[in-house]
Amino acid sequence: MIKANYPIDKFKDIQTPFYYYDLDTLRTTLEEINQQAKKSDFHVHYALKANVNPSVLAVIKEAGLGADCVSGGEVEAAIKAGIAPSKVVFAGVGKADWEINLGLDNDIFCFNVESIPELEVINELAASKGKIAKIALRINPNVSAHTHHYITTGLSENKFGINMSELDQVIDLIPTLPYIKLIGIHFHIGSQITDMTSFQGLCVKVNEIQNTFLAHNVKLDHVNVGGGLGINYEHPNHFPIPDFGAYFKIFQDHLTLQPGQTLHFELGRAVVAQCGSLISRVLYVKQGTSKKFAILDAGFTELIRPALYQAYHHIENLSSELPVELYDVVGPICESSDTFAKGFSLNQTKRGDLIAIRSAGAYGEIMASQYNLRKLPIGYTSDQLRPLTPKGE
């Protein structure tokens, strides 16, 4: 069984559970993103909702990515990390007044606006500051992402975005709002998308929607197609980096940009998921009537995805090379849903073994809670645990 290369000797001295981020994997991922994106002069914003660990954000900022934010707190985190406000986009179906004012005060690149009432509020708040708010319209293209229904965002019954039936009304309204400047259109159809035909379908819709704006003599500076590219959760050791080349080529081949338009992306999971693991210890191995339970000191308070989305994560016993056995891998939380996997093959496991739950760099640490009054997990990076080179060597 192939396992990731972890500094296990360092892990033994750290209180579990904790998150571990391999920054070498992150840097390699970012290099591939930049290499593939620059072929078509695409602009990539990192979706902070996936992970805001300061060390992770620092590496992403060094790589030159912009920021995609969905809260005022994320806008603050992006700016604190050194990402230029001119590269910050701010989406979200329910932006509070203070969050909008924060974006206005920092002159962010644009607000991705999701409703007519939001347009009117942004115009009012911008007027009070004597500013012009740059906005893109988040349009709901009614394209299926073929993914879990909790992370599908582009269908007509979802709460996100402006529906196609409202588009003419919105286009007519914008000229009446003097403190609004329309600079683009925005889309996001879902997350963990592995079927590339979904993105091809999005391109077809975007082309149609562009024609609607052209029919109204409205020129747009940019198109933002969101993110959603999935990763390989089953085989993180074999496929640590998504196929960004194939992903960007879909848009290069099927999306028709107008002269001078730029194309923007908002990648989150695909950037950080594979660099992160949740490291836990086995508290007990319990023999049930017909199965064994490996009871960990991590639970859904540290990683909620399996409980919330029935999501799969590859799991490795870092302490054992013994033959594999089947275990239900569970946590200590007083809920039956606190289960990471059922009937999972692990090297023979005992109390004290170190367990790695893989591909947890996205929507892991950031979604942790203190349910049952548990402590929030700490995140460590490979740079922090890397041995220091003595001076002179």
Image (spheres, rainbow, N blue to C red):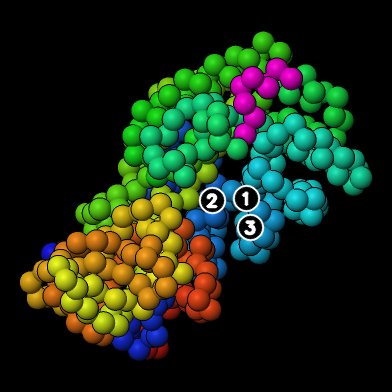
Q: Residues within 10 Å of mark 3 (few under 14, many from 20)?
A: many
- Is 8 colored magenta in this rendering? no
Q: CA distance from mark 2 to mark 1?
A: 8 Å
On the picture, is 165 further left or further right than 341?
right
* Residues tagged 3 and 2 counted as in contact (Cβ below 8 A): no
Q: Residue furthest top?
A: 215
Residue located beneath label 2 in the image: 47
Residue shown at the point (67%, 36%) measured from the top left: 114
Residue shown at the point (47%, 39%) measured from the top left: 152
Judge by depth and name the residue closer to the eye, 321 or 368: 368
Q: Is residue 301 above or below residue 262?
A: below
Amino acid type at image mark 1:
Val
Q: Position of residue 241 (x, y in %)?
A: 32, 51
On the picture, is 221 further left or further right than 142?
right
Q: Magenta region: which residues? A: 160-169
First-in-chain label (3 vs 2): 2
